[in-house]
Image (cartoon, rainbow, N blue to C red):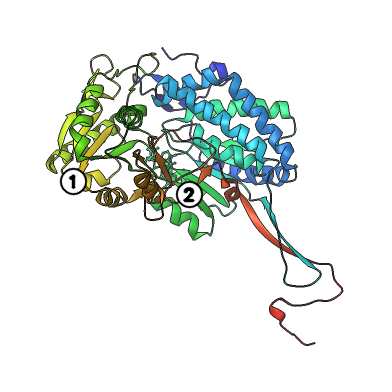
Amino acid sequence: MHTDLLAEFGIAPAGPNVVRSPIDGAEIGRIAYDDAAAIAAKIAASVAAFRQWREVPAPKRGELVRLFGEELRVNKAALGRLVTVENGKILQEGLGEVQEMIDICDFAVGLSRQLYGLTIASERPGHRMMETWHPAGPVAVISAFNFPVAVWAWNAALAFVCGDSVLWKPSKKTPLTALATQALFARAAAKFGEAPAALSQIVLATREAGDLLTKDPRIPVVSATGSTAMGRVLGPAVAARFGKSILELGGNNAMIVCPSAKLDLAERAILFAAVGTAGQRCTSLRRLFVHDSIYDKLLAALKLHYGKLAIGDPLAKTTLVGPLIDRAAFEAMEHALAQAVREGGKVTGGGRVLEAEYPGAAYVRPAIAEMPKQTPIVMQETFAPILYVMRYRDFGEALAAHNAAPQGLSSCIFTRDLQEAERFLAAAGSDCGIANVNIGPSGAEIGGAFGGEKETGGGRESGSDCWKAYMRRQTATINYSDALPLAQGIEFGE
Ligand code: NAD
């Protein structure tokens, strides 16, 4: 069923480790993991590539990223399909993920001519101060299974124009999309002609071997996307050697639906955010606070929509909900729903479907759990399509409950009341990295900084001024006078 997917990229990886599609559990490829010696060699090669690449003018570096973006455009259908086959997200979302890569390449190309510093007024006569941004060094990108290629592109496209080399450790659940992306990058590099061979490398490694990347002082920046549990281990390991980490960790995203909300828009936003990607986005909607006056109406509408969801083969055009990544994800969902019931919740939906057709896969019915309040299970991120719904009466209470979660990634409000919208966005409003009005919490554009606070890790990637995380800042003071005045007017032996 999924044969020849890799041939389109001209790759035929081999090795003892089987890669399976979550669509049906079928084998789609085999890979070999790098051992410690291979990883050490790749790190050394990355350092050498960096030393060469940092000398290339930034706009020229942008030309390589432009060529890579072209490869992605030409191969969007093939890579999008491979994302779907390896990760299980529906084809529209697989293609969307590749489009996101193209968008960030375009952004990075423009950025390659705008890596600007500052000129700062000096307190000393005949002096000038300036701030310059220099390439940082090899950047390790550790990515999660749920955005197998886009998250790497957010990091890598910026890192390349910033003059860095990149070592990419993809999730062991999605190595083939990484190898295919690398093959496309190699084509762009061949056209470019002057890129060092090890500018972009893939490290296929188990978690333990991933440690080699996090602990190596030659890698100044480690950008890691994944669970909060991963960040708790990785963050301190990178900090212990004074490296910089960009942590993009778990979310527990919420929506407040106010009395004045346009309910048809809210319903559509809820559906896309709560059941899209089978609830496996870091920005998936997990907590829904609905005003008492519209609660029954909205819940009834949602249950109707949930009852009609097309669940099945993510390659089929009509499907809206594909499989979970694996059986462990299904078991985590079952466990969370059972816990929700123990904590007073009323669950609609949930449970495995299409078991006879796909015994080796984990298709589930998305679930709505009506909760009496924000109980402990609601405070956890369960990476599955569970929507916890809670009733509120007072806006201030809803906002407080919204911010009570330990994670702080994405948030939104549906209202046509200006005061509520502005309160949500104000200093005492949502405490998340992303706050939307009349838009769901998922599906961000690349132009903004992406990331979140608290247990989400505090990192920012993609647009805005996130490029600064891939460079080192240098303050330079130039004296063009004939004197040597000291700062703060200090007199020293004169
Ligand atoms: P995961 O934490 O299991 O794995 C993520 C990556 O980290 C994998 O490559 C894994 O091998 C690696 N890893 C894990 N522990 C490590 C360690 N100690 N040292 C080095 N590498 C280590 O996450 P997952 O199941 O692949 O992805 C789902 C999670 O990712 C969810 O929690 C989701 O919210 C989060 N996520 C966050 C964002 C964001 O931008 N905030 C984006 C996507 C996914």
Q: Residue 459, which numbered label?
A: 2
Q: Can you say which quadrant of the picture contains the N terminus?
A: top left
Residue 314 sits above or below residue 420 on the image: above
Query: Circle 2 sits in a helix, a strand or a loop, which is it?
Result: loop
Q: Is mark 2 within 8 Å of ligand 1?
A: yes
User: Which sits in the foreground, 272 or 89?
Assistant: 272
**Residue wearing tag 1:** 373
Q: Amino acid at mark 2?
A: Gly
How many C-alpha atoms fall within 10 Å of the one at disc 1: few (<14), some, or many (≥20)? some
Residue 259 appears left or right of 269? left
User: Which sits in the foreground, 138 or 430?
Assistant: 430
Q: Residue furthest bottom?
A: 493
Query: Circle 1 sits in a helix, a strand or a loop, which is it?
Result: loop
Going 28% across and 17% down the picture, which residue do you hit? 358
Snapshot quadrant of residue 322? top left
Q: Position of residue 480 (x, y in %)?
A: 84, 67
Going 60% across and 50% down the picture, which residue do you hit? 468
Q: Amino acid at mark 1?
A: Lys
Q: Position of residue 66 (x, y in %)?
A: 67, 30
Residue 232 sits above or below residue 389 on the image: below
Going 48% across and 25% down the picture, which residue do you hit? 96
**One can see residue 430 in this view:** no
Q: Can you say which quadrant of the picture contains the C terminus?
A: bottom right
Q: Residue 153, which numbered label?
A: none
